[in-house]
Image (cartoon, rainbow, N blue to C red):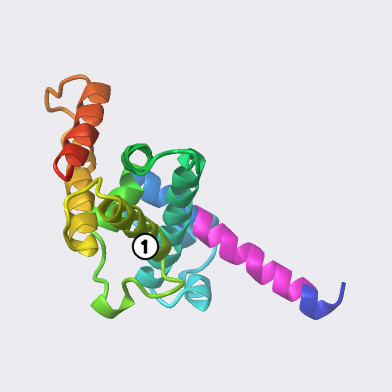
Amino acid sequence: MGFRERRKREQENIRQTILEAAEELLVTEGYEGISMRKIAEKIEYSATTIYLYFRDKQELFGYLMERYFAKLDRALAAVSDERDDPITAMKKSIRAYVECGLSNPNYYKTGFITPPEVQKETYLVEGAPGTEIYLSHRALVERCIRLGLFRPMDADLAAQIIWTMNHGIVSLLISNPNFPWVDREQLITQDIESTIEAFRA
């Protein structure tokens, strides 16, 4: 292996080390707990070194969210079954979304509750984190409408209403863990059933 190849591999290893340290801080302390200085201290590098790989905290956040959306994408793929009717597929998809959020609370809070400022034009851009997940969700909703399983309405409107309804249960369970909730499984199941019934034709 030549010098350039070794140098490239070394740089990629450092980059991954930075991302892993930032991920640990995100999981344990939340987005507010991440700073370039803390990451540098954790991996025993200078803060200057971190800036050689990431322009700022927000760029680093973008890469961390790519990891979360990859987890969510895998969770959705794991429950996908071509034999399912659209309503069953929708219920499985909603449950996977809820459970992935509850299993990764700091990622969810960072991405959906208190995200850093994200410019409007960066959403739903090909290759952007979460774009394919949203478009797949919209396509499933559109299919339910087209087959007459859901009431006729704009597919984006229906998709976003469903998203906001289920964002509610995830964000409340994460943000208010000490509230005397009823049985969590019962609450999630009924939330999913109520969401679907709200759109039934």
Which residue is located at x 29 percent, y 56 percent? 146
Q: Nearer the viewer, residue 102 or 39?
A: 102
Residue 83 location (% of width, % of height): 49, 39
Residue at the right extreme of this rendering: 1
Q: Is residue 14 magenta?
A: yes
- Which residue has dot 1 on it? 135
Three-letter amino acid code at the position of disc 1: Leu
Q: Residue at x 47, y 75 (%)?
A: 51
What residue sits 48% from the left and 54% below the top?
Answer: 70
Q: Is residue 151 magenta?
A: no
Q: Position of residue 135 (x, y in %)?
A: 36, 62
Q: Residue at x 52, y 74 (%)?
A: 53
Element under disc 1: helix
Q: Residue 33, position in %: x, y?
A: 31, 54
Up-down relation of residue 87 to residue 1 (above or below): above
Above or below residue 24? Residue 181 is: above
Q: Give the answer, above or below, for where 84 lies relative to 159.
A: above
Q: State left or right for residue 84 relative to residue 166.
A: right
For the C terminus, the image quarter is top left
Mostly what secondary structure, the magenta segment? Answer: helix
Q: Quadrant of residue 90?
A: top left
For this view, does 96 lie left or right of residue 151?
right
Question: On the rendered image, what quadrant is the N terminus found in?
Answer: bottom right
> Which region is colored magenta?
6-20
- Whether residue 113 is situated above or below residue 75 in the rendered picture: below
Which one is nearer the viewer's eye here, 149 or 109? 149
